[in-house]
Image: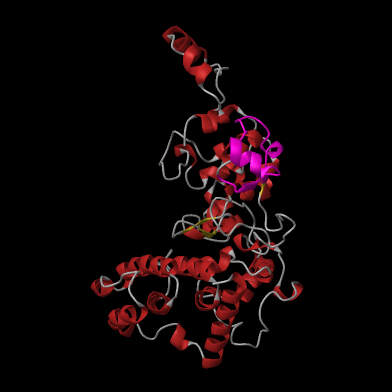
Amino acid sequence: MACEACQGPGAEHSARNHSPLRRYALQLSARADPSIRNPARMSGQRSAQVCGRCHGQRISAEVGRFLRHGDPFVPGDDLSQRSEPLWRETTQNGQTGLFAPRFWNDGTARLTAYEFQGYLQSPCARDERFSCESCHAMHRGDPRGPLRPDRLGDAACTQCHAALAGADALRAHSHHAPDGPGARCASCHMPALVYGLVDVRISHRIESPDPALQARDARPDACTLCHVDRTRAWAAQVSERWYGRRTVSSVPDAVPAPRSELARLPEVTRALFGGDPIERAIAAHALGRATAQAAPEQRRRALGALARVLSDDAYPAVRRIAERSLRRRLGEARPELLPLLAVYSAGLPPTRRAALLEPLRAALVPQAAQAIGPQTRSALQAQAVQLAIEIGE
């Protein structure tokens, strides 16, 4: 990416700043340089649009002209005058549903490069001051972020929500230990449910968790992504008790019938063996996080489930994410088994892969999938097959 992509045409800026006197005068005065555009000095919306030009898939009414002459957008202009963000319901040439697989049913992005859409969906964006620059800085911090060094962790949120910065307020708000992962703002309000670059990343739609509604919309919820041994119904009941949110019974078709074995299955387990590839990747990623406080039986079942995915899942990307999670968890719980994981290769034929991983699987029994009843296994397999048909695997 070139400088002009974020700061606009730079020929005049370069020419005028050949003079060291001008440069020093600007620095001493702390005035904005009028010969260049700086997203940090724009309104929140205009600044976010500069980022959204690349970090938010878009569509233009004049695609041909766009392709022939390039993107006419100049930083600081109104991006909506040049193109519109892609959404789940966006049509193209009169066709509907073309972009739906890129989003969860409630319109939240499932893929990276839709961060701008998440920004637009966030209540924080109603504040004129809020922009990508509120948390990120192009020339500071870790280049892989890049997060502003002064806004790491909860500081990104408490810069506005200052009343929640103290330990007592954080405990009362989150109902979790203030120094634990359950009290981190992003854990609940920006959960990891976006797939991209063979990894799972946080959502940029800032929201409050609502497990029952998110179950109805068939998308992951923040609660069961952390509490991987819990069901949707449990998450909805706790959410209702703590925050007065919806119960399962108030949201039609939120979860399977209470008496079914599927309803008693932890949500992450259901997604791991019955979800589409993105659901399975997110579930495998969730099983590898925050394991120190997990009960021994929970850790053992998670290890067995990850080993089964590593051996049996049809998607190399899902297996790679499971391998990372399994390696992390083995390092915590069963480091003596790490050498057995060294044989893993994402590109091996299925039978060869299964044979090489059999000693690891045998060491980790009982496996989570083997602890599931035969009817539930069949239901999960049917669910996965139906999802494969729907998305065209």
* Residue 99 image position (x, y, % from top left): 64, 59
Does residue 274 show up magenta in the picture? no
Q: Where does residue 326 sit, x and y in percent of width and height?
A: 36, 70
In percent of the image, x 39 and y 66: which residue is there?
320
Q: Nearer the viewer, residue 68 or 186?
A: 68
For the C terminus, the quadrant is bottom right
Residue pictured at 54% horizontal, 32% vertical: 6
366 above or below 149? below
Q: In the rendered view, does 78 fall on the left or right side of 135?
A: right
Residue 153 or residue 4, whichever sits in front: 4
* Front position in the image: 265 or 85: 85
Relative placement, left or right, of 335 versus 288 is left
Which colour style is shown?
secondary structure
- Where residue 305 appears, as percent x and y from the top left, is 42, 78
Residue drawn at x 63%, y 49% is 117
Horizontal and vertical percent position of residue 89: 71, 58
Count of numbered labels shown in the rendering: 0
Q: Is residue 370 in view from this perspective? A: yes
Q: Is residue 231 visible?
A: no
Task: Name the residue at the top extreme.
Answer: 21
Picture layout, residue 285 above or below residue 229? above
Residue placed at 68% from the left, 34% from the top? 78
Task: Name which quarter of the figure residue 233 lies in.
Answer: bottom right
- Residue stretch rendered in magenta on the structure: 55-84
